[in-house]
Image: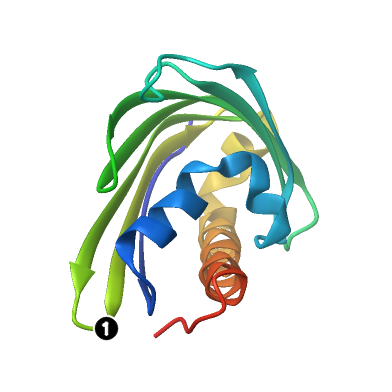
Amino acid sequence: MADYQFVTHWLIAAPKQQVWAAIVDSESWHLWWNAVESAVELEPGQADGRGNVRRLVWKTPLGYRLAFETRVMDIQAPTYLEVQAIGDVEGTGRWELSTCDQGTAVCYIWTVRTTQWWMNALAAIARPLLEWNHNIIMDRGGKGLARYLQTELL
Protein backbone atom coordinates (compact mmCIF):
# COMPACT_ATOMS: atom_id res chain seq x y z
CA MET A 1 0.00 0.00 0.00
CA ALA A 2 1.11 3.56 -0.67
CA ASP A 3 1.01 6.03 2.22
CA TYR A 4 0.13 9.71 1.84
CA GLN A 5 -0.23 12.70 4.10
CA PHE A 6 -1.85 15.83 2.75
CA VAL A 7 -2.21 19.09 4.65
CA THR A 8 -4.63 21.69 3.34
CA HIS A 9 -5.15 25.21 4.65
CA TRP A 10 -8.15 27.38 3.85
CA LEU A 11 -8.79 30.88 5.14
CA ILE A 12 -12.51 31.60 4.84
CA ALA A 13 -13.88 35.10 5.48
CA ALA A 14 -16.78 33.80 7.58
CA PRO A 15 -17.47 33.07 11.26
CA LYS A 16 -16.17 29.76 12.58
CA GLN A 17 -19.65 28.46 13.46
CA GLN A 18 -20.84 29.00 9.87
CA VAL A 19 -17.78 27.23 8.40
CA TRP A 20 -18.12 24.42 10.94
CA ALA A 21 -21.79 23.85 10.08
CA ALA A 22 -20.92 23.40 6.39
CA ILE A 23 -17.99 21.07 7.08
CA VAL A 24 -19.80 18.71 9.46
CA ASP A 25 -22.75 18.43 7.05
CA SER A 26 -20.95 16.22 4.54
CA GLU A 27 -24.28 15.06 3.10
CA SER A 28 -24.55 18.59 1.62
CA TRP A 29 -20.96 18.82 0.35
CA HIS A 30 -22.15 18.05 -3.18
CA LEU A 31 -23.86 21.48 -3.14
CA TRP A 32 -20.53 23.27 -2.99
CA TRP A 33 -17.77 20.72 -3.59
CA ASN A 34 -17.84 19.53 -7.18
CA ALA A 35 -15.65 16.49 -6.48
CA VAL A 36 -18.27 14.98 -4.16
CA GLU A 37 -20.55 12.71 -6.13
CA SER A 38 -22.50 11.53 -3.10
CA ALA A 39 -22.46 11.39 0.68
CA VAL A 40 -24.98 9.20 2.47
CA GLU A 41 -25.41 8.67 6.18
CA LEU A 42 -25.29 4.99 7.11
CA GLU A 43 -25.37 5.30 10.92
CA PRO A 44 -26.38 8.42 12.87
CA GLY A 45 -24.01 7.90 15.78
CA GLN A 46 -24.37 9.64 19.13
CA ALA A 47 -26.05 13.00 19.76
CA ASP A 48 -22.71 14.83 19.46
CA GLY A 49 -21.94 13.09 16.14
CA ARG A 50 -19.38 10.62 17.48
CA GLY A 51 -19.79 7.26 15.75
CA ASN A 52 -21.62 8.76 12.75
CA VAL A 53 -20.87 6.77 9.59
CA ARG A 54 -21.18 8.15 6.07
CA ARG A 55 -20.35 6.71 2.68
CA LEU A 56 -18.68 9.18 0.34
CA VAL A 57 -18.04 8.83 -3.36
CA TRP A 58 -15.57 11.27 -4.94
CA LYS A 59 -14.97 11.93 -8.63
CA THR A 60 -11.47 13.14 -9.34
CA PRO A 61 -9.90 15.40 -11.97
CA LEU A 62 -7.94 12.37 -13.20
CA GLY A 63 -11.22 10.61 -14.03
CA TYR A 64 -11.34 7.88 -11.40
CA ARG A 65 -13.70 7.55 -8.45
CA LEU A 66 -12.93 6.87 -4.81
CA ALA A 67 -15.48 5.43 -2.41
CA PHE A 68 -15.01 5.04 1.31
CA GLU A 69 -16.85 5.21 4.60
CA THR A 70 -15.98 7.66 7.32
CA ARG A 71 -16.67 7.16 11.02
CA VAL A 72 -16.49 10.12 13.39
CA MET A 73 -13.93 9.19 16.03
CA ASP A 74 -13.66 12.52 17.85
CA ILE A 75 -15.60 15.75 17.66
CA GLN A 76 -15.20 18.97 19.60
CA ALA A 77 -17.63 21.42 18.02
CA PRO A 78 -16.92 23.89 16.48
CA THR A 79 -13.18 23.31 16.44
CA TYR A 80 -12.15 19.71 15.79
CA LEU A 81 -13.45 16.74 13.83
CA GLU A 82 -11.59 13.48 13.30
CA VAL A 83 -12.82 10.69 11.05
CA GLN A 84 -11.53 7.24 10.22
CA ALA A 85 -11.80 6.23 6.56
CA ILE A 86 -12.21 2.68 5.28
CA GLY A 87 -12.57 1.71 1.62
CA ASP A 88 -10.58 2.75 -1.46
CA VAL A 89 -8.41 4.71 0.97
CA GLU A 90 -7.88 3.96 4.64
CA GLY A 91 -6.66 6.27 7.36
CA THR A 92 -7.72 9.43 9.16
CA GLY A 93 -8.92 12.88 8.32
CA ARG A 94 -8.76 15.75 10.81
CA TRP A 95 -10.51 19.10 10.44
CA GLU A 96 -9.19 21.85 12.73
CA LEU A 97 -10.88 25.27 12.76
CA SER A 98 -9.74 28.42 14.51
CA THR A 99 -10.89 32.01 14.55
CA CYS A 100 -8.56 34.63 13.12
CA ASP A 101 -8.80 38.31 12.20
CA GLN A 102 -9.94 37.51 8.66
CA GLY A 103 -12.55 34.89 9.64
CA THR A 104 -11.85 31.19 10.02
CA ALA A 105 -8.61 29.30 9.46
CA VAL A 106 -9.25 25.70 8.41
CA CYS A 107 -6.58 23.01 8.49
CA TYR A 108 -7.36 19.59 7.05
CA ILE A 109 -4.90 16.74 7.55
CA TRP A 110 -5.57 13.62 5.49
CA THR A 111 -3.31 10.68 6.38
CA VAL A 112 -4.22 7.68 4.26
CA ARG A 113 -2.97 4.67 2.38
CA THR A 114 -4.41 3.52 -0.88
CA THR A 115 -6.06 0.12 -1.14
CA GLN A 116 -6.73 -0.02 -4.88
CA TRP A 117 -4.27 -2.37 -6.62
CA TRP A 118 -3.67 0.02 -9.52
CA MET A 119 -2.90 2.95 -7.21
CA ASN A 120 -0.45 0.82 -5.26
CA ALA A 121 1.15 -0.61 -8.41
CA LEU A 122 1.62 2.86 -9.91
CA ALA A 123 2.53 4.67 -6.68
CA ALA A 124 6.23 4.99 -7.47
CA ILE A 125 5.62 6.79 -10.75
CA ALA A 126 2.12 8.22 -10.26
CA ARG A 127 2.59 9.76 -6.79
CA PRO A 128 3.07 13.31 -8.16
CA LEU A 129 -0.12 12.95 -10.24
CA LEU A 130 -2.11 11.63 -7.28
CA GLU A 131 -0.82 14.49 -5.11
CA TRP A 132 -1.76 17.01 -7.82
CA ASN A 133 -5.19 15.37 -8.03
CA HIS A 134 -5.74 15.73 -4.29
CA ASN A 135 -4.56 19.34 -4.27
CA ILE A 136 -6.94 20.28 -7.09
CA ILE A 137 -9.85 18.65 -5.25
CA MET A 138 -9.03 20.56 -2.07
CA ASP A 139 -8.51 23.86 -3.89
CA ARG A 140 -11.91 23.51 -5.54
CA GLY A 141 -13.42 22.58 -2.18
CA GLY A 142 -12.15 25.75 -0.53
CA LYS A 143 -13.41 27.92 -3.38
CA GLY A 144 -16.75 26.10 -3.40
CA LEU A 145 -17.18 26.50 0.35
CA ALA A 146 -16.51 30.23 0.12
CA ARG A 147 -19.10 30.58 -2.69
CA TYR A 148 -21.58 28.50 -0.72
CA LEU A 149 -21.12 30.75 2.31
CA GLN A 150 -21.27 33.81 0.04
CA THR A 151 -17.88 35.02 1.13
CA GLU A 152 -14.22 34.85 0.07
CA LEU A 153 -11.48 32.28 0.21
CA LEU A 154 -8.50 34.36 1.25
From the viewer's perspective, tell me whether residue 62 is left or right of residue 112: right
Residue 87 shows in the view: no
The coloring applied to the image is: rainbow
2 is higher (above) or lower (below) than 90: below
From the viewer's perspective, tell me whether residue 26 is left or right of residue 91: right
Picture quadrant where residue 35 is located: bottom right
Q: Which residue is mark 1?
A: 102
Image coordinates for residue 120, horizontal then vertical, percent: 58, 35
Which residue is more in the foreground, 93 or 23?
A: 23
Picture quadrant where residue 51 is located: top left
Q: Residue at x 42, y 37 (%)?
A: 112
From the viewer's perspective, tell me whether residue 103 is left or right of residue 12: left
Q: Residue at x 54, y 17 (%)?
A: 44
Image coordinates for residue 106, horizontal then vertical, percent: 32, 62
Q: Residue at x 72, y 61 (%)?
A: 34
75 is higher (above) or lower (below) than 4: above
- Label 1 packing within 10 angstroms: few (<14), some (14-19), many (20+): few
Q: Residue at x 52, y 63 (%)?
A: 138
14 is higher (above) or lower (below) than 97: below
Picture quadrant where residue 150 is located: bottom right
Number of numbered labels in the structure image: 1
Q: Considering the numbered disc 1 on the image, is that residue within a helix, a strand or a loop?
A: loop
Quadrant in which the C terminus appears: bottom left
Residue 57 shows in the view: yes
Which residue is more in the foreground, 101 or 154?
A: 101
From the viewer's perspective, tell me whether residue 12 is left or right of residue 122: left
Which residue is more in the foreground, 37 or 1?
A: 37
Q: Amino acid at mark 1?
A: Gln
Image coordinates for residue 4, horizontal then vertical, percent: 40, 45
Image coordinates for residue 21, horizontal then vertical, percent: 45, 50
